[in-house]
Image: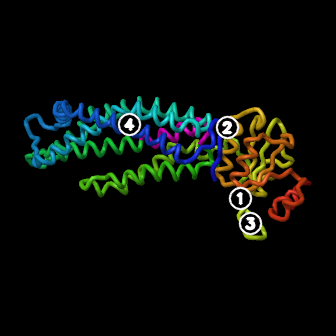
Amino acid sequence: MAILLESDAEKAVQSHLNDFSKRAGFVFVLVAVLTVIWSFFIDDVLKTFLQSLQPCQDDCLNVYGPAHWTEVRWLSSLFLGFFSTMPVMFHQFHAFAKTGLTKDEQRALTRIATLGCLMFVGGFLLLTTKLLPILFTFGHNANISSGLTPEYNALEMLTVATYLTWMFALVFGTWFILIMAGRMNILTKATADWWRIRTYGIAGLLMLLTVPAQAQALSIPMVVFLVAGSEVVARPWLTQSGIVKGRLSEWFDDDGRRRKLVIVETDGAHSAYTPEQAADIGVAILTVNSLQHNQEDRERVLLFLNHARITDLIVCGVEPNIHESLSENFQRMGITLHQEGRDAGVALVHPFISLLGDNASR
């Protein structure tokens, strides 16, 4: 089901593809140019980085694969070129996507990009200058205590350091997105599964696809750590009710079609049924300020209806002529709009009306 936001316009798919191709092409060219520029300084950068990682006092780093070293140099240049392009990349992405985002999502995206980039840079510097040297020094001391004379492959050290840095970026990014979505009231108990699939799924897939051969045994434990850690970090928001009360359940009509019904309370009007009664019956109640005069409330309702795949809707507190954008999106999503306790025809396709009658005296 696709919705059309009031800030967006109906356009052909090809026009979106043309706009995306133009912006993506500009970013790719900029990454290529910056990669070439970084290649002139990459030797000094890698030398400084390896010196900070070197765990021994004397010279114990070697390169056992000169051809592989050339590959590492260019991959490092590409990484730095990509990293340097992140501000421009975000600007192009935001300009492309903002017309299709709700106001809550636009604010969340801006905060995630701004604060996330600053915190990621700080965490990256802390990891590479403090934590990784401590980790390698600990391993070196363990080798010395075992009576070994260690010699370290610089390529292997860079591979491990790069992998750990990438894992840090994925875990930190996942946690930060969940926290910001929760603080913006986009992540709630009703939308938790939607966010889990997208954040855990994308981050976990990237972990499995990018793990180097030297760290294959860590791939599954890292994915488990990502999911378990994300559940703990985002627990306050994964369980918050947000604007939703009651309990959302699936019903099946006489034709076997799945039906989900939601009551929307707006403009100070309340349904005749309490949240407790709604929970017993198996229906969700959404409470917003105004559907007629508040665009953000309309967007919140539409997003919930889309994520939860609602099929039937009862609106309390609005005039018969509901907002035009809502009517259009209800048709797009195949949602049937009913009048509470007045639409006798609903009983033919949805059993909720008869249950309302049974519970009306409670």
| Location of residue 361 in the rendering, given as x and y in whole percent from the top left corner | 92, 54
Which-is-in-front pick, marks 4 and 1? 4
* Residue identifier under label 1: 249
Answer whether labels 2 and 1 touch (C-beta < 8 Å).
no
Sequence-earlier tag: 2 or 1: 2
* Residue identifier under label 3: 252
Which-is-in-front pick, marks 2 and 3? 2
User: Is the residue 92 above or below the residue 75 in the image?
Assistant: above
Magenta-highlighted stretch: main secondary structure? helix
Q: Is residue 184 magenta?
A: yes
Point 57% across, 34% down: residue: 106
Q: Is residue 120 magenta?
A: no
Sequence-earlier tag: 4 or 2: 2
Mark 2 to mark 1: distance in Å? 29 Å
Classify 10 Å Cα crowding around label 2: few (below 14), some (14-19), many (20 and above). some
| Location of residue 245 in the rendering, given as x and y in whole percent from the top left corner | 73, 47
- The answer to whether 135 appears left or right of 51 in the picture is right
* 161 vs 108, nearest the viewer: 108
Classify 10 Å Cα crowding around label 3: few (below 14), some (14-19), many (20 and above). few
* Range shown magenta: 172-186
Mark 4 to mark 1: distance in Å? 45 Å
Look at label 1 and name its amino acid. Ser
Point 67% across, 41% down: residue: 242
**How many numbered markers are drawn?**
4
Q: Which mark is residue 92?
A: none
| Location of residue 13 in the rendering, given as x and y in whole percent from the top left corner | 55, 48
- The answer to whether 199 appears left or right of 65 in the picture is right
Look at label 3 and name its amino acid. Phe
* Residue identifier under label 4: 27
* Residue identifier under label 2: 6
